[in-house]
Amino acid sequence: MSLHVVATIPIDPAQAAAAAPALAALAEGSRSEEGCLSYEVFSSQAVPGVFVTIEEWRSQEDLDAHMATPHVASALEIAGPLLAGDIVIHPLAPVGG
């Protein structure tokens, strides 16, 4: 069974335009990884400055490897100073059936 993950990335709304290209590059790099089944990044239409990733990984090991890639480090280097809170990563488990 694959692993679904949602991450929320709160950026200072005044800096959202500066963070967006780094997050788009993160998504592009992530999609090229061996264990990545899907990786999309969105900007919240409800909360200015909040970006959300919706990801699917083949396994926890693939997600762990993803966190150590240069494109993750690059995105964190650029977005880190622009953060308006903590990045929260939500590994998901199915409910019911």
Image (cartoon, grey):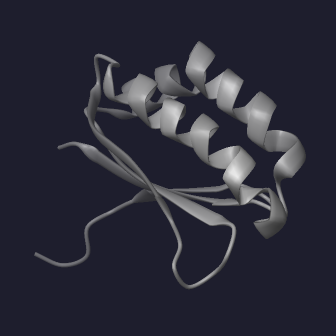
The percent position of residue 7, horizontal first and vertical second, equals: 54, 56
Pick out the residue farthest to the right. 81
The percent position of residue 47, horizontal first and vertical second, equals: 63, 81
- Residue toward you, 12 or 97: 12
> Which residue is at a point 84% across and 50% down the rendered structure image?
82
- Residue toward you, 14 or 11: 14
Residue 83 falls in which quadrant of the image? bottom right
Vertical position of residue 5 compared to residue 34: above or below: below
Vertical position of residue 2 compared to residue 53: above or below: above
The percent position of residue 1, horizontal first and vertical second, equals: 17, 43
> Which residue is at a point 51% across and 79% down the rendered structure image?
45
The percent position of residue 31, horizontal first and vertical second, equals: 33, 29
- Left/right placement of residue 93 relative to residue 6 reads left
- Left/right placement of residue 82 relative to residue 19 reads right
Residue 3 falls in which quadrant of the image? top left
- Left/right placement of residue 57 relative to residue 21 reads left
> Which residue is at a point 31% across and 32% down the rendered structure image?
59
The quarter of the rendered structure image containing the C terminus is bottom left
- Residue toward you, 23 or 59: 23
Q: Is residue 92 visible?
A: yes
> Which residue is at a point 68% across and 54% down the rendered structure image?
17
Pick out the residue farthest to the bottom. 46
- Left/right placement of residue 82 relative to residue 34 reads right
